[in-house]
Amino acid sequence: MKDLKQIHARKIKTGRIRDPFAAAEILRFCALTDHYKDLEYARLVFDQIEEPNCFSFNTIIRAFSETNDQLIESLIIFNQMLYNEYVQPNNFTFPSVLKTCAKMGRIEEGKQVHGQIIKRGLGLDLDEFIVSNLVRMYLICGVMNDARKLFDKSAVRSSDLVGDGNVVLWNVMIDGYIRIGNFAAARELFDLMPKRSVVSWNGMIAGYAQNEFFREALEIFRKMQLENVSPNYVTLVSVLPAISRLGALELGKWVHLYAEKHKIEVDDVLGSALIDMYSKCGSIEKAIQVFERLPRRNAVTWNAIIGGLAMHGQAKDALDYFIKMEQGGVRPTDVCYISVLSACSHAGLVDKGRSYFEQMVRVVGLKPRIEHYGCMVDLLGRAGLLEEAEEIILNMPIKPDDVIWKALLGACKMHGNVEMGKRVAKRLMELAPSDSGSYVALSNLFASLGDWEGVAEVRLMMKEKDVRKDPGCSWIELDGTIHEFFVEDESHPRAREIHLMLEEMADQLRLVGYTPDTSQVLLNMDEEEKENTLYYHSEKIAISFGLISTKSHTPLRIVKNLRICGDCHSSIKLISRIYNRRIIVRDRNRFHHFENGFCSCMDYW
């Protein structure tokens, strides 16, 4: 840059730059070259050009359109260009100006630019970059109807002209629908596309995954392969979160193998996604392997492995990795402390949890978020320190949300504190009157103490307010297919075989002396009915299906949407010993590794 300024100085020692081509090159270098970009200097160069040509105008407009804090300069210079009698905007000018209008949300200026495009006849049906940026501008500014009208008009003409259609334009329109959550319209356009690029596939996969349509994301990913479109780095990073949430380990392994086979670099971003995937799919060993092989590690990768270990209840290992991270000179982030506090909570390490919270605030200087306070409430609540947990909620500088109160209500049920439970439930119902979780938790508390009148009152409240309980659901992946089961589910094609295996499991449990824990049935019915209800919990149905569908000794990996109940936890421990299976269950809070009659949580969950 120093040499460039010297060259520039020699050219302007007479006061002005008269050679527009030399000036344009200097301008391009200091305005658009990544390592040497200096927009203040670029603006100085532009202002000293005696007769800037179209290239110079386009260069400086584009440079300012790529900023976040100097966007207005792009519009000011464009306005100067409009009033320049020697130079007029061309098809390279408008995409940058439209990008500026979109980023600033300036729809009126955007419409004026649209008018200039029409006035100059610059290609609503010929120039894909202009029309794509025009549609994108309307979409980002929230004018969906105008964007769709423009798309419908331009897409047809582009299709006639180039045969395969304007892929960029289709992608822009689909992305617009995804942004506003209209996935039906996005999918309709995607299916109608004359031709799809890998960007088209990636956009749909990422859109579905980021909005929690995980099965749809995997469906698109599989369809992509059937149409012989090769996934790239972005595809893998986009699909891995969906795989993680569904616990689809075999598909996750395929993605990892694909990356290695096709020489796709496993950097910190892809590496973190793989670590997260293996952790959430129940294979913490593979997560550790990926982490240890990473050539470079940053706070994100450390967070991923510490969070994974915490989720699996391996508190000692999680804290050891945290210490290694600090020793390696990586500053802990607030996300990392959430994982550390969670690890302490799952293991009952109250003093360590307090110590790490203090370290975060007083030593590292991080301001606690509501998630950190939530971890502390969970830590203290599990340990039976209910009053201290409530004090944290009442004195925290952030307004508590329903999640943090639910943690305390769950602890009230765990330790049988009815009075505090009622008080907490009342607050919860005020905060989230239509959320079933608080009603169910209070009902569970009454039921666990045999207070059926209290249960009836809560259920009546739910009925009056039309609040419905979320159904328990578990799923298992076999041969790349996700099999989903609900409580007392008989919809599966192999329902008869599953039912027979459930009966066999019940018989085997009786033979080893197991008595169902009917206190977990939160309904006022006789003991036999309660026992039958327990046999058909969704995780047991998923395990039954796994047993009849896999070879002996094959580990079973189950994902459940709710917290596993006490009876299922106790019976699955025995099932793991009876059938000599390792059974890994991911519930709403953590992982349980059942093996040879024991659980990794040591019955503290």
Image (cartoon, rainbow, N blue to C red):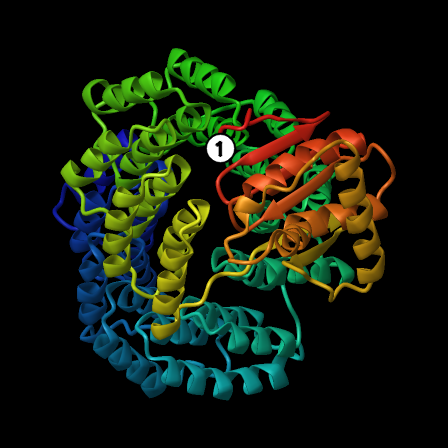
Would you call the spot at circle 1 few (<14 residues within 10 Å), some (14-19), or many (20 or more)? some
Image quadrant in which the N terminus is located: top left
User: Mark 1 is on which residue type?
Assistant: Trp
Up-down: is 278 above or below 474?
above
| Residue positioned 56% across, 56% down in the render | 472
User: Picture coordinates of residue 174 (x, y %)?
Assistant: 51, 71
Left-right relation of 177 to 427 = right
Q: Residue sitting at 25 percent across and 55 percent down?
A: 426
Disc 1: which residue: 605
Which residue: 19% across, 20% down? Answer: 362
Question: Can the viewer see residue 479 in this picture?
Answer: no
In the image, 328 versus 451, the foreground residue is 451
Which residue in the rendered view is the most extreme toward the top? 327
Q: Nearer the viewer, residue 272 or 552?
A: 552
Residue 74: x and y, percent? 23, 61
- The residue sitting at 61% across, 22% down in the picture is 293
- Compared across the picture, whether 454 is left or right of 291 comes to left
Identify the residue at the far front of this view. 526
- How many dots with numbers? 1
Q: Taking 17 as reference, is 292 left or right?
A: right
